[in-house]
Image (cartoon, coloured by chain):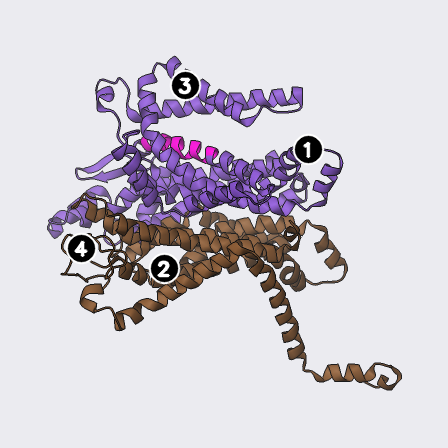
Amino acid sequence: MSTGDLSPSSSLVQSFSKIPRWRRLFQLRMRGLRESWSIFSNNKLAIFGLVLLVIYALMAVIHPILMKTIWPNTIYNPATGYDPNIFPHPAPPSSAHLLGTDSLGRDVLSRLLAATTPTFILAMTAALVTAALSTLVGAVSAYYRGWLDSIFGHFSDLLLLAPAPMVMIVISGISQLEPLEFGLLYGFLAGLGGTAIIMRSYALTVMAKPFIDASRVAGAGAGRIIFKHLIPQMLPLASVQMLLTVTGAVFADGFSTFLGLSITRLNWGSLIWDSFTLMTFIPEVPWNVLIPPAIAISMFAASFYFIARGLHEVAEPRIRQR
Amino acid sequence: MLKYLLRRLISGLILLFIFVSIVFFAVNTLLPGDWVSYYAMGLTHSESAALRQELGLDANIWQRYLVWVGNLFQGDLGRGYTIFGLGAPVTETLKQVIPSTILVFGVGTVLAFMLGEWLGRVISWRKPDFLTGSATFSAITLYTSFPPWLAFLFTYFLVRRYNLFSTDPNRTIWRRAPVTWSGIISDMVMALLIITLAVMILNYLYQRWKRRGLPRLLLLAIISAAWYGSWMYMDILPYARDVMRVATLPLAAYVLLTFGEIMLIMRTTMVDTLHEQYITTARAKGLTSAEVRDRHAARNALIPVVSRMVVTLPFIMTGMVMLERALYWEGIGNTLFYALGRQDVTVAVGAVMVIGAFSLVARLVLDVLVLYLDPRLRTPSESDGGVL
């Protein structure tokens, strides 16, 4: 600083510039995060959704630990367990089996927990891949228009003719997919297909708003407009789309085991289906087997919606005034 | 605008052709084995080779593709495979199931759209209270409920326990019937289409005259009354009533599963419009809150909802196979998955093609709707690219 001694605040400027640039940026970012968090945490439903998601994550982690410590494998194994101390199976909830047992004498809670891990991995992968891909593709094609837009558009149209669950069911009938692969493939199909079309049409309405023109006049480049102005506006809708993807992916996974096209994987859908199948032998309806996985699927997808509502308030400050 | 729609139609048809070709190759090559190896497992090598030759399965995949494309352009989709060799033409099979799909999914989609749009519109403009909370809660619960589970609850309580509806037709009526099940359904669908179109045109004329359309509930009532009347006019009343008795379950289950999604998106976008300046202007003009909501905010908020419908239609149509199956409703999706399970390649490809054609038509309809809703997109420079 050559003219630093002329300015009255030179010492202040010098002391400020001593702090490394990355640290200043980091502090700014942290402050922004903290503000967003305080807005997000004011919404009770969003916190509820987050708590639900954390509970699911715990459920996914806790099953192997329980199996190693207090649950003997012969009784609590999710596939082959059998409790000889109880006679008529399915049995109602008891202290040894908190959710009772199913028609084959397996512990329902253990099966529910064991099904959480693959479903959790699958749903998270599918949701994140869809949201990221569709937001990026939507923003880029709404910003550039022209040939890039028409390539993406036609590709989405092509994918749209083949509904993602249908494709996934057929594919998992041909080859056994791991949950991660299933999620990635589903996210790819949904994110470049239908969801990209929605995000693009929303991005078009954002592009028509005056603040985009304003930032263009102020000299902002393509990258800045897309990442600083366009994508933050698209995030609330993207998070709602995440909910839709989660239900679609979980249902498609459950349904692929339904048709008998793939070897039965353990997931919430197949838990329901298993007890439907067993009901042909034992006609009494085992409510304690059916209701937990049905609630588990609903709550899992609903938790994403609640989080979406919280994110919506963060991204759209004006609705907080209500 | 007509030119634009024509271009969309042509590019859509080309895409449909590419898509069906991909499906043809995928179904023929990716599925393990073929129809002969699946059904005629006990045959010797020479016998199965002879059967393959008879069914035309021995040729190279490219030759089969060329033959198939040649037939396709003559409107011939080939014939399905059955235990007795070549079965009924695929077009006949599809003709029987398409009307029942249109009946449940067409009517269901329209009803779900109206219900979801209305609920989302009303809820977004209310202060959060018990009513909005319970509406949102039930929408999320229904939307996220696993379709076979919902179907099971329906059959368990409404059919098995209280015997209100039925999942299969009343045999005594149909035994002596001069008509078939699918014939009645296609008559009913045609009548409904004509009536709906007529009522829409009348409503449009009324709107030009009075500057305001009739309330939607009244329109629905008129359409359903006229539909019921048309059954009597066509002299198919007992059969049509039996069809509706069976169709009500899948229809209701479908509406309940679908409306939540539309409501959630409508709500999200309505909240966004709430603070736009034109809303403030409309309020300042002295319009009532309901008028501002319905005539200014809702029209803009509808655009994302409509574009969502484009994606939802084909997606749910196949996704709801679970529903069709659990409730024994013979639709296009049911046919598709049965065909896939039996390696009945021609029927499967035909069903996929119909699903693709459905989504293409829905796409065009929604394109027109978006152009109607958003005048900004009607300027010449904008209409070059895709609208949605």
| Label 3 environment density (alpha carbons within 10 Å; few <14, some 14–19, many ≥20) | some
The answer to whether marks 2 and 4 mark residues whose Cβ atoms lie closer than 8 Å is no
Q: Nearer the viewer, residue B68 or B335?
A: B335
A30 sits to left or right of A281: right
Chain A rendering hue:
brown
Residue assigned mark 3: B228
The answer to whether marks 3 and 4 mark residues whose Cβ atoms lie closer than 8 Å is no
Residue assigned mark 2: A119
Q: Do labels 1 and 2 share a chain?
A: no
* Dominant secondary structure (helix, strand or loop) of the stretch shown in magenta: helix
Residue at image position (62%, 71%) is: A30
What residue span does the magenta drawing correspond to?
B96-111
Marking on residue B288: 1
Indicate the secondary structure of the residue bearing disc 1.
loop
Q: Nearer the viewer, residue B206 or B147?
A: B147
Residue assigned mark 4: A104
Amino acid on which the number 3 mark rests in the picture: Tyr
Q: Position of residue A170 (x, y in %)?
A: 32, 51
Chain B rendering hue:
purple
| Dot 1: chain letter | B
| Label 4 environment density (alpha carbons within 10 Å; few <14, some 14–19, many ≥20) | some
The CA span between labels 1 and 4 is: 63 Å
The CA span between labels 1 and 3 is: 37 Å
Amino acid on which the number 1 mark rests in the picture: Thr
**Is residue B102 magenta-colored?**
yes
Q: Where is residue A149 in the image (x, y as percent from the top left)?
A: 58, 53
**Is residue A64 magenta-colored?**
no
Q: Which of B310 and A41 is in front in this view?
A: A41
Q: Looking at the image, is B89 positioned above or below residue A44?
A: above
- The nearer-to-camera label among 3 and 4 is 4
